[in-house]
Image (cartoon, rainbow, N blue to C red):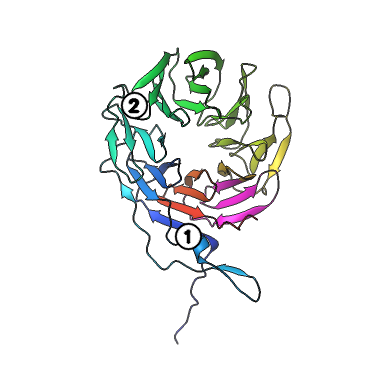
Amino acid sequence: MTQHKPPQAMTLFDLIARTWDLNTEVRALQFNAKSTSLVAQLADGQLAFVSVKDTESPDSRVRVEADTGRASIRPRSKPLPPPVFSEAPVAHTAVPPCRLGEQGFAFAHPETKVLWRATARGQTLAMSAARGDAVTALATLSRSRQVAVAHGNRVGLVAEDGGAERASIELDHDVTRIAVSGDEALLACWGAGQVSIIRAVDMECQAQIACEGEVLGLEWSPCQRWLVSGCADNAALLVDVAAGTSDRIVDFPAPVLSAQFSDKANAVIASGAFRVVGWSLPDLPFGDHSGAPIETGKPGLTIVERVAVHPKRDLCAVSYGTGLVMLCRIGHPHEMLVREGTGAAVNALAWSDDGAHLAIGGKDGSLSIATFPKNMFK
């Protein structure tokens, strides 16, 4: 007797996302400034580039039934263009790439010890005027068309066109993380248990603040009073830049792989617990003050591994060790399933600046761009 099985139903993710198999673990993701290209940094140092432009975007495939008004998305009919790979492993895996100009990227080259650039289409070349010292951290100052580059304890501002150094400062500690304030007036440079606050206009050090823990990232608050970072030792770091002091939120059940501020929700959120952890600004947990906690999403039995704040709305993307990805409204229990678990952890989550695209990079070498229809969040 022949047994007929119904075809597997397509999920929302199948309909709105594009997915590529890069064959190597994805370590970092970065959209360019125009949100026309996405670069994935792989575990072997190779770079993979995909175009964000979609000839079969979800909006172009939405159909609305005239009698009921019900909207549906038809499946894709064309194969996806393949990613473009750098010709050889060319990026330092410990230094994530940053934006360069409107279309390109800057990255550290481990062999030549020179700053390199990549175009949106994946062409790579050395920046001829760049210093020959090993790069340990990068960050973009888009308004002044500069890149902040750390070479150990030396931090310099270089021109995005050619890499010539315009100004620099030598600190008494090495730098492995650089965060640029929203107005690009200040640089926060972390390394060796210290964070130095540097004025970008003259590269003068305003303050140096002791910070415990193994910092995994660094981000300014919208008001530019606070810095936040997740730490590998199951804690989150908060720095009160105005007061020149720091504190740690401890006893997370797992490493805090990501911590970010949300301007739209006026809050800070973090991973590392059984739900998204967060507090409302300006009432943060600091010193003897417990702060004003907020609850996001629903508690579960699986650790939240990563969070990524939406740039335009009070939303965040949330990933779990199973590969499950959810979309949550910050400070509310509402959740929306984006992707079912794949069995492989998510190593990187990144939003495009317009909030239309969410990039997901996996430990299994998968790379996805989920593009949300314009009317999805209305």
Q: Position of residue 183 (x, y in %)?
A: 55, 28
Q: Secondary structure at mark 2?
A: loop
Q: Residue at x 57, y 35 (%)?
A: 259
- Asked whether 79 or 340 is in front, the reply is 79
Q: Earlier in the sequence, mark 1 or mark 2?
A: 1
- Asked whether 363 or 184 is in front, the reply is 184
Q: Residue at x 42, y 27 (%)?
A: 146
Left or right relative to 257: residue 19: left
Left or right relative to 114: residue 257: right
Density class for disc 2 (Cα within 10 Å; few <14, some 14-19, many ≥20) is: many
Q: Which residue is mark 1?
A: 57
Residue 61: tell me if it is visible. yes
Q: How many marks?
A: 2
Q: Is residue 256 above or below residue 316?
A: above
Q: Is residue 376 above or below residue 42?
A: below
Q: Residue at x 66, y 44 (%)?
A: 330
Q: Amino acid at mark 2?
A: Gly
> Is residue 319 part of the magenta span, yes or no?
yes
Q: Which residue is mark 2?
A: 163
